[in-house]
Image (cartoon, grey):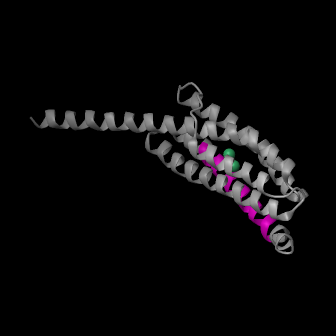
Amino acid sequence: METKSKSSKKSAKSTDESKLREFFIDELKDIYWAEQALYKALPKMAQAATSKKLAKAFEKHTMETEGQIATLEKAFELLGEKAEAKKCKAMEGLLKEADSVIEDTDEGTHTRDVGLIVSSQKAEHYEIASYGALTVIAENIGEPKVAKLLKKILDEEKKTDISLSIVAENKVNASAAKE
Ligand SMILES: [Fe+2]
Ligand SMILES: [Fe+2]
């Protein structure tokens, strides 16, 4: 009797774990889509930027994003899963907002840069939330190597967020206030 209840408890746990694994893979597909969308959007944002420093920050993050896409592919491989992208509606919306910033502001203005920084920081924060949670889940499902890869991306996103704040605070916001 006791053995039976113990084994049924164990099987319930492993089902939960596989459900969590399934959820995790799904979320990984979501962020994989998000990174690919960012990889396409960032050069447009760099081109639209007025400040050279901001354009450079976007260009640098485009390169990093390319690396992050490759890192995610490595994570899928470690999990024995096919790297598949699943449309991330949140990132799609955030990037649409970035497009509207470009449409609604004048070329060559610092106000446009302020808008681009706000949009890109919203995207960075979405990524930070995603990778923070995914790193913990990877550890919980017994995938420490995957967790390590995700943590590496998380740290890059945090650094990008800080560098965007520095560009905003150093000059862009003040210049925009004078326009
Ligand atoms: Fe990213
Ligand atoms: Fe990012």
Look at the image and tell me whether residue 60 can be seen.
Answer: no
Image location (x, y in percent) of residue 81: 54, 26
User: Which residue corresponds to the image point at 88% horizontal and 57% vertical from the top-left?
Assistant: 50
| Vertical relation: 160 (above or below) 148 | below
Does the magenta segment cover residue 165?
Answer: yes
Q: State the residue in front, 106 or 8.
A: 106
- Which residue ends up furthest to the front in the rendered image? 104
**Quadrant including the C terminus:** bottom right
Q: State the residue in front, 14 or 39.
A: 39
User: Which residue corresponds to the image point at 74% horizontal and 65% vertical from the top-left?
Assistant: 165
Does the magenta segment cover residue 166?
Answer: yes
| Vertical relation: 92 (above or below) 178 | above
Look at the image and tell me whether residue 108 can be seen.
Answer: yes
Q: Is residue 6 left or right of residue 130?
A: left
Image location (x, y in percent) of residue 99: 73, 48
**Magenta segment:** 150-169
Image location (x, y in percent) of residue 2: 12, 37
Q: Is residue 176 left or right of residue 5?
A: right
User: Which residue corresponds to the image point at 66% horizontal and 53% vertical from the top-left?
Assistant: 124
Image location (x, y in percent) of residue 177: 82, 74
How many numbered marks, from 0 up? 0
User: Which residue corresponds to the image point at 81% horizontal and 60% vertical from the top-left?
Assistant: 113
Q: Is residue 78 left or right of residue 55?
A: left
- Which residue ends up furthest to the left in the rendered image? 1
| Vertical relation: 158 (above or below) 140 | below
**Quadrant including the N terminus:** top left
Q: Main secondary structure of the magenta part?
A: helix
Q: State the residue in front, 73 or 1.
A: 73
